[in-house]
Image (cartoon, rainbow, N blue to C red):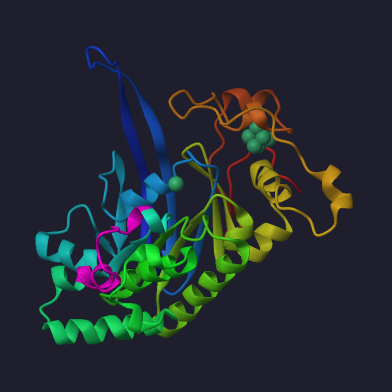
Amino acid sequence: SSYLVEVNNVKKYFPIKTGLLNRVIGQVKAVDDVSFGIRAGETFGLVGESGCGKSTLARVLLNLKSATGGEIKYAGRNIHTAGNRELRKLREEMQIIFQDPFGSLNPRFLVKDLISEPLRVHRRMSEQEMDNRVVELMEMVGLDASRRNRYPHEFSGGQRQRIGIARAIALNPKFIVADEAVSALDVSVQSQVLNLMMKLQKELGLTYLFIAHGLNVVRHISDRVGVMYLGKMVEVGKTEELFAKPLHPYTSVLLSAIPKPTTEHRDERIILQGDVPSPANPPSGCRFHPRCPFAQDRCKTEEPQLQTVSDERQVACHFPLQ
Ligand code: SF4
Ligand code: MG
C-alpha cells in the first residue's frame, strides 16, 4: 500500500454511566467507522467542529487510546498487535504536538528539560550530547538556544509552540500529529509556525496529520483534507479541489464560515441551523440532516456511505453539491 498510516473502519465508543450506580446507560460514538489513509511525506488536514471526534481519532491513531473496533496500520503493520519492542519504536516514530502550549508544557521544567525529555526516555546519551542535541533542536525551530535554561512562561505563545515542535522532532520521528497546534495563536504567528512546520517537513521528510476546527488553517499546509462531522468522515479530497468545489453541504458551510476578503459577500454565507447534536444520540439517517439546508426525506432514514466519486475524492451524501 502507498500509505504510511492506514485507518480502517476505526470506531471509538465511550460508555455513558449514571452517576449514582455507575451503570452504563448508553455510549458516545465519538469515532464511528472511519477509514482513510495518509501517504508518506504528505500533510492530511482533518477538520470539523469541536466534538466531532477528530482529537479522539488522533489519540486512537497514536495508540494513546484503544480502539473499540477497526484497525490502524503504520508502515503496513497493525499497531494494536505490535509487540513491546515494536511499540517502543512506534512511540519514537509517531509524535504529537498539542493545542495549548501552556497546558502541554510543565511550568516547573526548564525548556532544555522539556525538549530533552523524550531523549532521556528513549536514548542513552551523556549530558553533553543531550545539551548539544537541545541546542541543535532549538536552532532547527528558530529559537535562541542561549535561552534553554529558562522556563516556558518566559516565552511567547508562538515560541512555546516551537518548543513543543522541538520536543516532537527530538527522536527523529516520521509521523507527527498536530492537534490544533496553531489554533490558539494569532493569525500572523499562526502562519510563522505553519511555515516552520512546512520547512521541517521538507528537511526531515515528515508526514503530518494536521487537525484544526477551521478549514482556513489547514488550507496552506495540507495536500489533502478530510472533513469530519459527529464521528463520521463526510468528505475527503485534494485541498484545492475541495476548496474550489465542496461536494458535501457541511464542507460548503465550513467554507462559507471563512470570512471573505470583501464584506459585501457576507450575506451569501449559509447559516447553520441549530447546534451540533450530541454524539451520544446522533440523528437518524444522515447525521447532518437536522442542520442541512438541502435535506430531503431520504436523508432522515438512510445513512449515506462515504463513496469515491472521482480520483482522490470521496463524499458521504445522498445529494452531493454539483
Ligand atoms: Fe444533507 Fe442529505 Fe447530504 Fe445529509 S445526505 S448532507 S442531509 S443532502
Ligand atoms: Mg480537539
- Identify the magenta region: 103-118
Residue at 26% x, 74% y is 112
- Front in this rendered view, residue 307 or 202: 202
Image location of residue 23, percent across then percent down: 24, 16
Whether 117 is among the magenta residues is: yes
Q: Is residue 271 magenta?
A: no
Residue visible at 44% across and 75% down in the picture: 41
Instruction: Give the quadrant of residue 95.
Output: bottom left
Query: Who's the residue at 21% across and 68% down the image?
Result: 117
Q: Would you place residue 173 above or below residue 245 in this image?
A: below
Residue 125 rendering spot, x and y as whole percentages? 12, 81
Question: Is residue 207 among the parts visible in the rendering?
Answer: yes
Residue under the point 37% across and 58% down: 6
The answer to whether residue 258 is left or right of residue 192 is right
Residue sitting nearer the eye, 246 or 302: 246
In front of the other: 75 or 55? 55
Quadrant containing the N terminus in the rendered view? bottom left
Along the line of sight, which residue is nearer the eye, 117 or 258? 117
Q: Is residue 94 found left or right of 202 in the rendered image?
A: left
Above or below, 3 against 231 in this view is below
Rendering coords of residue 266 (x, y %): 83, 47
Q: Is residue 115 above or below residue 300?
A: below
Q: Check the image and name the residue furthest to the right.
A: 264
Furthest residue to the top?
20
Q: Is residue 85 above or below residue 255?
A: below
Residue 39 appears in the rendering: no
x then y, percent, for residue 280: 43, 25
Q: Quadrant of residue 66?
A: top left
Location of residue 68 by image quarter = top left
Q: How many marks?
A: 0
Q: Is residue 10 left or right of residue 183?
A: left
Name the dominant secondary structure of the magenta segment.
helix
